[in-house]
Amino acid sequence: MDRFMEIAYKEALYGISKKHGGPFGAVIVKDGKVISKAHNQVLLKNDPTAHAEVVAIRKACRKLNTIDLGGCTLYASAKPCPMCIGVIQWSRIKDVFFSGDYEDTKKLNFDDQSFYEDFEAEDDHWEQIDEEHFDTLIQAFESCKNDIKY
């Protein structure tokens, strides 16, 4: 087994043993060194965003003091979900290695299919309002964007 994937598996097993959440672990590596590692902590923190990948990315950003993790590699015990894919993209991680795929996690009732359907469907619960007021935020951001990296 790949040594970094083994760390992701150990993280996942630890999380399972503590009943912190699903069987998910993640490791972020840069230049062959582990920057951060994490396991799913959704139940521990009562936080639906505390997936292993997100927790590992948060730790890596703090450790490296940056939001740009370009040049880092993510190892995950399973293929990242739609939310995690978004976080991976925003953090600029390019290379991702995973073990279990969506069919594997679906067997455990971690089924992402409804998310993909929601992305494509019109949602009666989402509505744009007060669009004209967003210009104020655009102007404020533009006036100080040299000071704001993100």
Image (tube, rainbow, N blue to C red):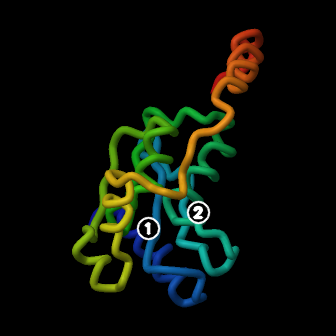
Residue picked out by circle 2? 49
Which residue is more in the foreground, 142 or 34? 142
Residue shown at the point (62%, 43%) measured from the top left: 61
Q: Whole-percent x and y of residue 76?
A: 39, 62
Number of marks present in the image shown: 2
Provide the secondary structure element on which disc 2 rests.
loop
Is residue 4 visible in this depiction of the protein?
no
Q: Amino acid at mark 1?
A: Ile
Question: Dividing the image into 4 quarters, which one contains the N terminus?
Answer: bottom left
Quarter-of-image position of residue 72: top left
Residue shown at the point (50%, 73%) measured from the top left: 11
**Compared to 12, does 63 lie above or below?**
above
Question: Dividing the image into 4 quarters, which one contains the C terminus?
Answer: top right
Residue shown at the point (72%, 25%) measured from the top left: 133
Direction from residue 142 to residue 120 in the image, left or right: left
Name which of mark 1 and mark 2 comes first in the sequence. 1
Residue picked out by circle 1? 7
Q: Residues within 10 Å of mark 2 (few under 14, many from 20)?
A: some
Quarter-of-image position of residue 18: bottom right
Residue shown at the point (58%, 40%) measured from the top left: 128
Provide the secondary structure element on which disc 1 rests.
helix
Q: Amino acid at mark 2?
A: Thr
Q: Whole-percent x and y of residue 81?
A: 39, 61
Q: Residues within 10 Å of mark 1 (few under 14, many from 20)?
A: many
Which residue is more in the foreground, 112 or 54? 112
Q: CA distance from mark 1 to mark 2?
A: 21 Å
Which residue is more in the foreground, 6 or 117? 117
Quarter-of-image position of residue 44: bottom right
